[in-house]
Image: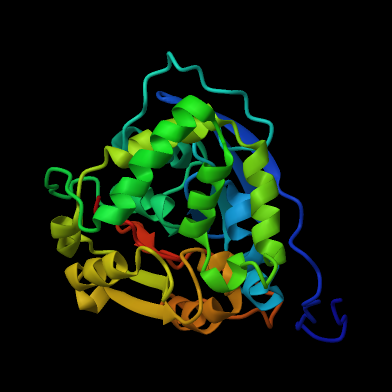
Amino acid sequence: MADSSSDSVSIDMETPPPSGKDNLIKTSHGSLSVTIYGDQDKPALVTYPDLALNYMSCFQGLFFCPEACSLLLHNFCIYHINPPGHEFGAAAISDDEPVLSVDDLADQIAEVLNHFGLGAVMCMGVTAGAYILTLFAAPCTWVNPSFSSVQSTLLDRMVMSNLLYYYGMCGVVKELLLKRYFSKEVRGNAQVPESDIVQACRRLLDERQSSNVWHFLEAINGRPDISEGLRKLQCRSLIFVGESSPFHSEAVHMTSKIDRRYSALVEVQACGSMVTEEQPHAMLIPMEYFLMGYGLYRPTLSVSPRSPLSPCVENFIVSATLDLSN
């Protein structure tokens, strides 16, 4: 509640995030669902989720962390972009529809920003979403042919692709996805039940259109390795990776390729790939320090920030893990 005797505002930290405004944006590669939270006069924060997830299942934990929610919504207007066909109630993508490339997906982001008249933005992506946003941030990055640095994860993706195509969102596919997202501590076992976040994610996967997930997976499977070009990335990067993530070694490797003047790696204990859901509180202090570099801060005054971002550079924050090599 505002105190009429001063310019300060008392923030109700228990209040959940406000409801968002859903938009369906037409792009040259099909329509894209974008949900907007907050004041569109503020700087833009763009999010992109991981495979088979939408913004609610990938970022809800972070935005239901009161301190993180107040920090982000005070400083930003949030533009949650869902991969094609990953929004709630999405129709199935026909098998006859061509598979988009990762370049096509990155181009869609540029068209969304043009639609809303956005220049400089900050970005937050999880795993596959982090790759797409990195490609968007460095469209001229030199790339190598695809290769696999971790054969087990490549094999999992090939198995998942075949299962999705022939059997849909079957039990094995769901287990592979949950293993991709979460640490064993929250996935449970014969003696310990699954945590609430895993159960909620499992229910959401039941609602996914398997053909839509397959199309996104095929785009990711065909992605080029951009690791050698990351040194040209001039925007700042904050990378979170769970120590139990199947992509932990890739995140460390990719961080070594980014100019250290512009990047920092935060390793989160007892956590999988989806730090935003499993350990959102671990992101708060690193995010605060990261945002201080742009003059952004926790909400204490009634004055809303206006964009401190350079109009010449896309500013880049990556949550969870960078899954950039194939």
The image shows residue 200, relative to residue 305, as above or below, that is above
Q: Is residue 11 left or right of residue 60?
A: right
Q: Is residue 26 visible?
A: no
Classify residue 24 by image quadrant: top right
User: Residue 129 or 153: which is nearer the viewer?
Assistant: 153
Residue 108: percent from left, percent from top? 41, 35
Residue 303: percent from left, percent from top? 66, 74
The residue located at (49%, 77%) in the rendering is: 287
Classify residue 16 by image quadrant: bottom right
User: Residue 150 or 124: which is nearer the viewer?
Assistant: 150
Classify residue 99 by image quadrant: top left
Q: Quadrant of the N terminus?
A: bottom right
Residue lying farthest top?
A: 96
The residue located at (27%, 37%) in the rendering is: 222
Q: Is residue 205 left or right of residue 126?
A: right
User: Residue 82 or 74: which is nearer the viewer?
Assistant: 82
Residue 128: percent from left, percent from top? 40, 50
Q: Is residue 245 visible?
A: yes
